Image (cartoon, coloured by chain):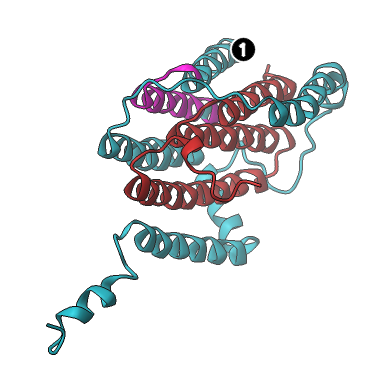
Amino acid sequence: MSVPVFYYVILSAIVFLTGVVGVLIRRNIIAILLSIELMLNATNINFVAFSDHLQVIGGQVFVFFALTVAAAEVAIGLAIIIALHRSKSTINVEAFNLLKW
Amino acid sequence: MAYVFFGYFAAMITITSILVVVLRNPVYSTLSLLVMFFHVAGLYITLHAEFLAAVQIIVYAGAIVVLYLFVVMLLNVNRDDRYHSQSRIAVFVSIPLAIEFLVLLSGGMGAARRDPAAMAVDAQTSDNTLTIGKALYSTYLFSFEVASLILLAAMIGAILLAKPHIGKHEDKDMPQAPGAQ
């Protein structure tokens, strides 16, 4: 008796929405990056759940690649944060409006 | 039994992911994210993806969270920051997402409950790591090489971005040259 894949989709949607809300309401850049991690994990849960449901290994391989991209994104993002903090000594996103329309 | 495990992991994942967004202190947010990663790894084990559970703990909980904590403590951002109010963008983003969530809640019941198609690879009976390795080095070989390139580019980019004054190095050396004083 296994859990239907529908429950996993709902769980993933909840985590993804939490990540979207976090990106929108937080002002700390580190918290925004953490919210992006939440969204990536939500998609990973979906991939693994459907990989188990459909008995296809490709979903798990794709999670592997998503994990690679997440690691690269964290490295680049944190380097950008350090560079921003060095130039303006704050990481509040409202202090950075040079590229705003 | 499967429902008990799923319920526990799902509840913990939901609570900790909400805590990541709600908590004001970035250190607490990161630690909450760490707890969430462990529970996602547990969820992977219940989904017969043992290799991914191990990789999740090693890469996410081991490397990424440590990197986050390092930066949080390096920058010393313990200031209490208020929440952002971006109502226009929030409306544009949240209305399609809310509609999608409602569609998922209403229509997903029947569509997702089809019989598992017994396709080529039986991930349950055979060794999970062996199956992933075979797929990774045969079908997805090109993607695997591209992933290594992505990691190389990210490493070079991170070093270049985080290194202080990389463009001004020559300018700083120039006045020191003979004849400058």
Q: Split into 4 quadrants, where in the image is the N terminus of chain A?
A: top right
Residue B65: quadrant of the picture: top left
Q: Amino acid at mark 1?
A: Tyr
Task: Give the side of residue B165 with respect to residue B54, left or right.
Answer: left
Task: Check disc 1 and report the residue beneath it.
Answer: B3
Chain B, which colour? cyan
Using the image as rendered, state which of residue A44 and residue A40 is in the foreground.
A40
Chain ID, mark 1: B
Chain A, which colour? red
Is residue A35 in sight in this rendering?
yes
Using the image as rendered, state which of residue B50 and residue A74 is in the foreground.
A74
Secondary structure at badge 1 equals helix
Image point (62%, 41%), residue name: B123
Image point (39%, 28%), residue name: B30
Magenta span: predominant SS is helix
Height in image: A57 above or below A12?
Answer: below
Using the image as rendered, state which of residue B34 and residue B166 is in the foreground.
B166
Image point (47%, 53%), residue name: A72
| Residue lying farthest to the bottom in this orientation | B179
Height in image: B108 above or below B172?
Answer: above
Using the image as rendered, state which of residue A4 and residue B19 is in the foreground.
B19
Q: Which residues are magenta?
A: B22-44
Image point (56%, 17%), residue name: B14
Does the magenta portion include B41? Answer: yes
The picture places residue A18, in percent across and down from the top left corner, at 60, 23
* Numbered disc total: 1
Is residue B48 in sight in this rendering?
no
